[in-house]
Image (cartoon, grey):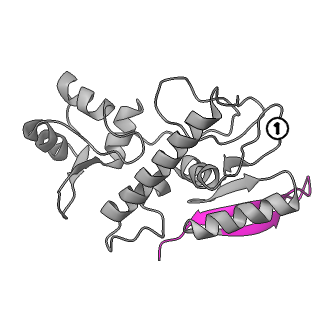
């Protein structure tokens, strides 16, 4: 990408659907984003435009390289944009459980649509490229959409964290039953989970990777 996007193009990028990356704009704006490698036009009707990984990084403020998901237990900033709950002692409970449930259901349906639109065979039973580029958020959304509760300062629950292994996340749960339930959920969502033991702490955890076939 030789030049920064224009102010108008950046507004289109920032207004993209927070989960699917679906874009809305004039044909000229969308075509220009495609030329810059920030968007692509889906080959199947209705030929919508979506952010590429470079477009997602531009929206997130790091156009040059992917921003690594950090393991720090920080709550998501209150930006009005949906953010998956990855769990952690510093994560606060949502102000409205009913509203959060609606948001999670909508985000999950949007992610299934993104799978349909971007997987070459239109499959919705396995993760898509966006999920492989946002492993922690994708796994956390799959868990929360299935009814699992993330860990907070006052409530035990799941935690999703990065790992040194490419295309894999670590999932922790408060007990063996909850860990097994998380594994079942991720498997149904198209992930490949395996249970392991940390050598130092002896804690059990899942190592989960998005399935490709």
Q: Is residue 107 left or right of residue 187?
A: left
Outermost residue on the left side: it is 28
Residue 68 seen anywhere in this rendered image of the structure: no
Residues 12 and 109: in front is 109
Question: Residue at 54% across / 23% down in the picture?
Answer: 78
Residue 193 seen anywhere in this rendered image of the structure: yes
Residues 160 and 201: in front is 160
Outermost residue on the bottom side: it is 213
Residue pointed to by mark 1: 155
Task: State the quadrant of the N terminus.
Answer: top left
Q: Residues within 10 Å of mark 1 (few under 14, many from 20)?
A: some
Question: Residue at 72% across / 70% down in the picture?
Answer: 194
Question: Residue at 18% across / 63% down in the picture?
Answer: 43
Region of the chain picked out in magenta, as a range:
193-213
Q: Position of residue 19 (x, y in %)?
A: 42, 45
Q: Position of residue 168 (x, y in %)?
A: 61, 59
Label 1, secondary structure: give it: loop
Residues 64 and 72: in front is 72
Q: Is residue 117 above or below residue 24?
A: below
Q: Is residue 98 above or below residue 51?
A: above
């Amino acid at each position: 990408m030789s030049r920064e996007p224009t102010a108008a193009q950046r507004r289109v990028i920032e207004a993209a659907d927070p989960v699917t990356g679906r874009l809305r704009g004039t044909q000229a704006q969308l075509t220009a984003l495609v030329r810059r490698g920030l968007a692509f036009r889906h080959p199947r009707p209705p030929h919508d435009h979506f952010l590429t990984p470079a477009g997602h990084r531009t929206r997130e403020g790091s156009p040059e390289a992917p921003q690594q998901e950090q393991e720090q237990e920080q709550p998501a900033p209150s930006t009005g944009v949906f953010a998956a709950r990855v769990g952690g002692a510093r994560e606060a409970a949502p102000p409205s459980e009913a509203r959060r449930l609606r948001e999670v259901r909508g985000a999950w349906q949007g992610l299934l649509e993104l799978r349909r639109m971007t997987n070459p065979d239109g499959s919705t039973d396995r993760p898509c490229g966006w999920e492989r580029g946002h492993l922690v958020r994708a796994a956390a959304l799959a868990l929360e959409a299935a009814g699992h509760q993330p860990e907070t300062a006052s409530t035990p629950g799941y935690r999703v964290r990065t790992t040194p292994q490419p295309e894999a996340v670590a999932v922790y749960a408060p007990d063996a039953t909850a860990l097994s339930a998380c594994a079942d959920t991720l498997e149904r969502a198209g992930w490949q989970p395996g249970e392991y033991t940390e050598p130092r702490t002896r804690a059990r955890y899942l190592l989960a990777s998005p399935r490709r076939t």
